[in-house]
């Protein structure tokens, strides 16, 4: 709901089509292209009439940008996929680059660091946008941790296919978070937050995980 | 004799994770090389432009590979170089063996070459009673230890100074020392003797210039210069993708390769070899033979997605940047090509059925693509290979029934909002079995067996329970309260 609040605050007319489910990335990333293309078609049919599509996940947004690869030799679907992809944006990119808004009037008290989710960073090239948004939050002390742009080890099915490797990568991330001495670690993808938060919870850390939309929607100090 | 275990990535990786010495070495690699690369990169004005040019050169070459190869051959032949075409590794080994035998050599000196590693040339030479001597220090250490390289550029990166000292005591018979100068001095003394005796030197090739018939090989130790210059016969094993059209193209790659690989502005030596010696008094070999190796490369070339695999210039930057490689090291990949590029090349060289785990040995974070000097989209290649594996007909790789079923279920349950909502409700009931104190802690026993991903996840991490109120419920409440705008 934080995403809805943020979007409404900047004057957007927000709709949520209840038919929507999943972008199909888990199938695509594991190689199940037929299943993934079914998801993609459904997504396109539901969303293609929207003016703009905003997602609070770099990963889902990046998947939408991959849709066209699922229709080799099918020009019509390829075209529809591309036009949907062109108007699909990650929340941070949408706010800063399209609406040119980097101050949401939010307030949040805490020492906060940002974890670059891989898809947001490398597929959508959003590095400065989330940092800019966070720095403008009243009461928020922004700290850059080391290797903020290194993967947390989630990687979808990778996290359960190779849990030991995934956890090894994760522990480097946890080490960097602890070194940064923050109260809250923020990211733009709930999957990274589940991975990082799951480990923080397991080791009994006091550091909290929050989605950037939650911070931007926050009014408390 | 080493064993390739490309199909046991999971076991290999688990063993590697338990090795604290390896972990220390890998951490050094990650810290040093990544930082050195960053500094070296910044000494070039337009790094991005350079990458784009390099890729364009590679794409142009690969699109007309047959023409450029023939041009390369024709021009090199003018300088007296002889060519041999090898369809696969076995044929390449056979050709090299015949050439070595013809010179009557019982020993050959070798410089570091991934192509010769790929075809297991040393095994073939040894089997025929010919002793290959690796002359790159790292490769020589690996050879003494009877191992395969664990890194494309730094083959012995997994070994510590102490381990190398012990190896020298055991294999070379010197007294134990921690002095690196003494160790390298020992290697130099032994290898110099071999250079002086060798009748044949075997090398790889970094670039072959079509326009001039020139071979370029880069190195830091000077051993390649001796391998290719001292013996009467020089044999170079060269993958067919190593050709570039013009001499000036080297400028681009000479800026990119050392910076990406070792963080150097330039390697200590660049050997440009154009033909055999002209007069009897000249230095250099009487004979140069180039073995052009296909070994699966034409197949990579034939598909628009896999073709980019052939743009690789073997710099190793993707290994250094890869979080997975940093955890498990090179040997876990069970192939001479480890890391992200190995995870895409190995299955293509050996067949998917012999390396079916490797395309999944990645979190798809994209760090490899970001550092690649020739902009190879490794995640795209990994996904392409995963799709081939999932399609039984294309790959002959049997996927686990449970996995196929899981994706069928996912496909049907998550593709309709009603079913999706029902699933959420069902999960909320089911999770009562595992939620304690507001979270899902370690799940083992029966439930973990029944739902393996849950067991795998919670072995290391807690899982959040399903929210008491879903987004959909909150959205409906919002609409009902008339606050829908």
Image: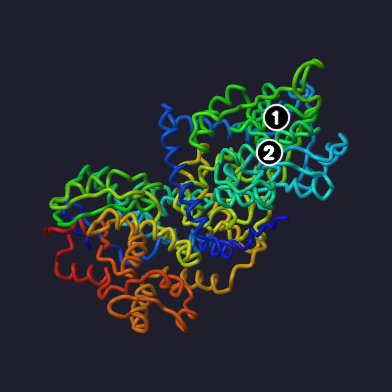
> How is this picture coloured?
rainbow
Local SS, label 2: loop
Mark 2 or 1 closer to N-term? 2
Q: Measured from the top left, where is residue B89 in percent x and y?
A: 75, 46
Q: Quadrant of residue B11?
A: bottom right
Q: Please, is residue B133 above or below residue B362 in the view?
A: above
Q: Please, is residue A140 above or below residue B182 in the view?
A: below
Q: Measured from the top left, where is residue B200 in percent x and y?
A: 79, 34
Q: Compute the Cα span from label 2 to label 1.
A: 9 Å
Q: Measured from the top left, where is residue B181 in percent x and y?
A: 57, 38
Q: Is residue B464 toward the left or the right of residue B275 in the image? A: left
Q: Nearer the viewer, residue A142 or B403?
A: A142
Q: Quadrant of residue B290?
A: top right
Residue at the image position 26 percent from the left and 68 percent from the top: B471
For the residues beneath circles 2 and 1, the answer to whether they share a chain is yes
Q: Which residue is mark 2?
A: B135
How packed mark 2 is, by other alpha carbons closer than 10 Å (few <14, some 14-19, many 20 or more), is many
Q: How many marks?
A: 2
Q: Which mark is residue A76?
A: none
Local SS, label 1: helix
Check the picture and name the quadrant holding the C terminus of chain B: bottom left
Check the picture and name the quadrant holding the N terminus of chain B: bottom right
Q: Which residue is mark 1?
A: B226
For residue A209, say whether it is visible: yes
Dots 2, 1 in contact, CB < 8 A = yes
Q: Measured from the top left, where is residue B300 in percent x and y?
A: 65, 45
Q: Please, is residue A75 above or below residue B470 in the view?
A: above
Q: Quadrant of residue A178?
A: bottom left
Chain ID of residue with mark 2: B
Q: Nearer the viewer, residue B148 or B318?
A: B148
């Amino acid at each position: 709901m934080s995403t809805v609040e943020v979007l409404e605050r900047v004057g957007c007319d927000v709709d949520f089509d209840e038919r929507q489910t999943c972008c199909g990335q888990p199938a695509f990333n594991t190689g199940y292209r037929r299943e993934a293309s079914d998801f993609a078609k459904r997504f396109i049919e539901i969303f293609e009439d929207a003016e703009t599509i905003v997602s609070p996940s770099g990963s889902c947004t990046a998947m939408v940008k991959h849709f066209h690869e699922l229709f080799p030799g099918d020009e019509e679907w390829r075209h529809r996929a591309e036009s949907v992809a062109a108007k699909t944006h990650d929340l941070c990119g949408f706010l800063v680059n399209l609406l040119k808004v980097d101050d949401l009037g939010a307030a949040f008290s805490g020492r906060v660091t940002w974890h670059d989710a891989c898809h947001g960073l490398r597929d959508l090239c959003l590095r400065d946008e989330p940092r800019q948004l966070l720095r403008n939050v009243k009461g928020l002390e922004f700290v850059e941790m080391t290797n903020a742009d290194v993967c947390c080890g989630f990687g979808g099915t990778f996290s359960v296919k190779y849990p030991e490797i995934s956890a090894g990568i994760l522990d480097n991330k946890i080490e960097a978070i602890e070194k940064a001495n923050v109260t809250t670690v923020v990211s733009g993808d709930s999957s990274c937050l589940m991975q990082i938060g799951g480990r923080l919870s397991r080791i009994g850390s006091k550091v909290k995980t929050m989605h950037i939309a939650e911070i931007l929607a926050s009014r408390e100090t | 004799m080493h064993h390739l275990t490309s199909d046991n990535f999971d076991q290999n990786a688990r063993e590697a994770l338990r090795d604290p010495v390896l972990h220390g070495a890998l951490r050094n690699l990650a810290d040093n090389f990544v930082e050195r690369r960053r500094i070296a990169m910044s000494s070039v004005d337009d790094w991005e432009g350079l990458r784009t040019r390099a890729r364009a050169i590679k794409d142009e070459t690969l699109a007309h590979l047959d023409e450029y190869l023939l041009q390369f051959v024709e021009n090199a032949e003018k300088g007296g170089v002889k060519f041999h075409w090898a369809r696969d590794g076995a044929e390449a080994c056979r050709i090299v063996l015949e050439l070595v035998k013809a010179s009557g050599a019982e020993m050959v000196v070798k410089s570091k070459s991934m192509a010769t590693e790929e075809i297991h040339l040393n095994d073939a030479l040894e089997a025929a009673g010919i002793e290959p001597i690796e002359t790159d220090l790292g490769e020589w250490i690996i050879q003494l230890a009877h191992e395969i390289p664990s890194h494309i550029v730094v083959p012995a990166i997994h070994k510590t100074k102490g381990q190398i000292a012990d190896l020298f005591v055991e294999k070379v018979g010197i007294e134990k020392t921690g002095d690196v100068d003494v160790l390298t001095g020992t290697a130099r003394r032994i290898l110099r003797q071999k250079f002086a005796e060798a009748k044949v030197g075997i090398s790889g090739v970094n670039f072959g210039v079509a326009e001039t018939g020139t071979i370029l090989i880069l190195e830091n130790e000077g051993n390649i210069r001796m391998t290719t210059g001292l013996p009467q016969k020089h044999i170079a094993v060269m993958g067919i993708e190593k050709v570039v059209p013009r001499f000036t193209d080297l400028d681009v790659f000479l800026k990119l390769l050392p910076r990406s690989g070792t963080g150097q502005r330039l390697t200590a030596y660049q050997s440009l070899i154009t033909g055999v010696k002209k007069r009897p008094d000249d230095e250099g070999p009487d004979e140069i033979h180039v073995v052009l190796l296909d070994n699966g490369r034409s197949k990579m070339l034939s598909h628009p997605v896999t073709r980019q695999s052939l743009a690789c210039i073997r710099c190793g930057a993707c290994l250094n940047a890869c979080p997975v490689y940093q955890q498990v090291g090179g040997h876990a990949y069970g192939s001479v090509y480890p890391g992200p590029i190995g995870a895409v090349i190995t299955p293509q060289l050996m067949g998917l059925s012999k390396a079916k785990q490797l395309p999944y040995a990645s979190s798809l974070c994209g760090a490899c693509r970001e550092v690649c000097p020739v902009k190879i989209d490794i995640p795209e290649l990994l996904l392409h290979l995963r799709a081939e594996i999932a399609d039984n007909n294309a790959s002959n790789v049997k996927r686990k029934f449970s996995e196929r079923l899981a994706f069928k279920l996912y496909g049907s349950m998550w593709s309709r909002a009603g079913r999706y909502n029902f699933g959420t409700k069902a999960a909320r009931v089911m999770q009562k079995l595992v939620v304690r104190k507001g979270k899902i802690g370690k799940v083992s026993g029966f439930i973990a067996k029944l739902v393996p991903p849950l067991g795998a996840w919670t072995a290391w991490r807690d899982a959040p329970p399903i929210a008491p109120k879903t987004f959909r419920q909150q959205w409906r409440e919002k609409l009902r309260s008339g606050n829908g705008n």
